Amino acid sequence: MSDEIIKEIEQLKKDKNAIILAHNYQPKEIQEIADFVGDSLELCIKASDVADSDMIIFCGVNFMAETAAIINPDKKVLLPDNRANCQMADMISLDELKAAKKEHPDCEVVLYVNSRAETKSEADIVCTSANAGKVVSSLNSDEFIFAPDHNLGVYSGKESGKTPIIVPEDGHCYVHTMFKPEDIEQARAEHPDAKIVVHPECNDDVRQLADYVESTGGMVRLAKDPEINKLIVGTEIDLATRLARENPGKEFLPLRRDAFCLTMKIITLEKVRDALKEEKYEVVVDDDIASKARIGIQRMLDLSN
């Protein structure tokens, strides 16, 4: 059955001149039918370079599809399931961000890409977990407003030597805050020959115990290191799926087997096919919001390039 659906998807892609982009946390079958798989930064960069396509099928969560729509106002961007949201992205409200800007008028605003379009419209620059330290280092001020992930805000401050003002104080990713120091201690006891990498959205006490702290894109590059044959991965479980597929002969173990992002798993092959066939669910961002949000996104892309 899945083979038939994959054939349908391939034909519909040709008919609609579409490209499928998928995040590293998507299930194996979605990763395999995607034209490009990456982390948030890589997907932003790829989404800015799809001139030959008329349609983008975004296999991820809503803020990712919104970002692709902001970058590509002349493309049709589809999210195969419109329930695919990100809890963290909804933890910062537009009013809360505006209040922080009013309280700290001399601070530039760095907004994590894991945020909704309307809040991006109030940002000076956007960042991802892959480039947060670099983005913050580029700022003119020594203090900066950061939203919405507390842990990445702290991490980017340490990386840059600057002081974050984090809003909201408790913004977080429920998957990455699952990881505890005892998980690393247990992993070291059970696999003394392995290296451990964790995501910067993890709590600081977890980051300090790991061998490496990397975005998912950084983990993909780390996995290719010829010196590393066994890697314990402290992020969403399906990143290990990608690493194993791309690095045969090496071993990749999830730091926790219950580290699932539930909304990343609701996109299926059937939903991708139906999105192509029925052109649903289109992601549309208000023109005024998009034009403002595009400034911070483009500034990040220019810095990355």
Image: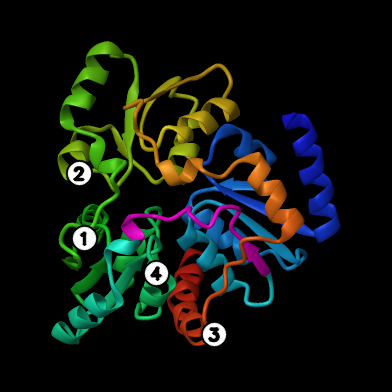
Q: Does any portion of residue 35 appear in the rendered image?
A: no
Crowding around mark 4 (Cα neighbors within 10 Å: few <14, some 14 to 19, many 20+) is many
Write down the quadrant of residue 149 in the picture. Answer: bottom left
Residue 13 horizontal/vertical position (percent): 79, 52
Q: Quadrant of residue 236?
A: top left
User: Is the residue 274 above or below the residue 257 in the image?
Assistant: below
Q: Please tell me whether mark 2 or mark 3 is closer to you in this view.
A: 3
Q: Which residue is mark 1?
A: 157
Between 82 and 9, the one lying in front of the other is 82
**Eye-nearest disc, 2 or 1:** 2
Q: Residue at x 42, y 32 (%)?
A: 237
Q: Is residue 219 left or right of residue 211?
A: right
Q: CA distance from mark 3 to mark 4?
A: 18 Å
What are the residue bounds of the magenta stretch? 76-89
From the image, state whether disc 1 or disc 4 is nearer to you: 4
Question: Which amino acid, mark 2?
Answer: Asn
The residue labelled by disc 4 is 126
The residues tagged by marks 2 and 3 sit, at their Cα atoms, a distance apart of: 37 Å
**Residue 5 or 200: which is nearer the viewer?**
5
Q: Which residue is mark 3?
A: 287
Mark 1 nearby-residue class (10 Å; few <14, some 14–19, many ≥20) = many
Q: In the image, residue 232 lies at what x, y percent?
A: 36, 25
Q: Residues within 10 Å of mark 3 (few under 14, many from 20)?
A: few
Residue 203 % position (x, y):
20, 44
The residue at 58%/48% (across/down) is: 22
The amino acid type of the residue labelled 3 equals Asp
User: Principal SS element in the magenta part?
Assistant: loop
The answer for how far apart the CA atoms under marks 2 and 1 are is 14 Å
Residue that carries the numbered disc 2 in the rendered image: 203
Instruction: Check residue 82 for magenta coloring.
Output: yes
Q: Amino acid at mark 4?
A: Val
Q: Earlier in the sequence, mark 4 or mark 2?
A: 4
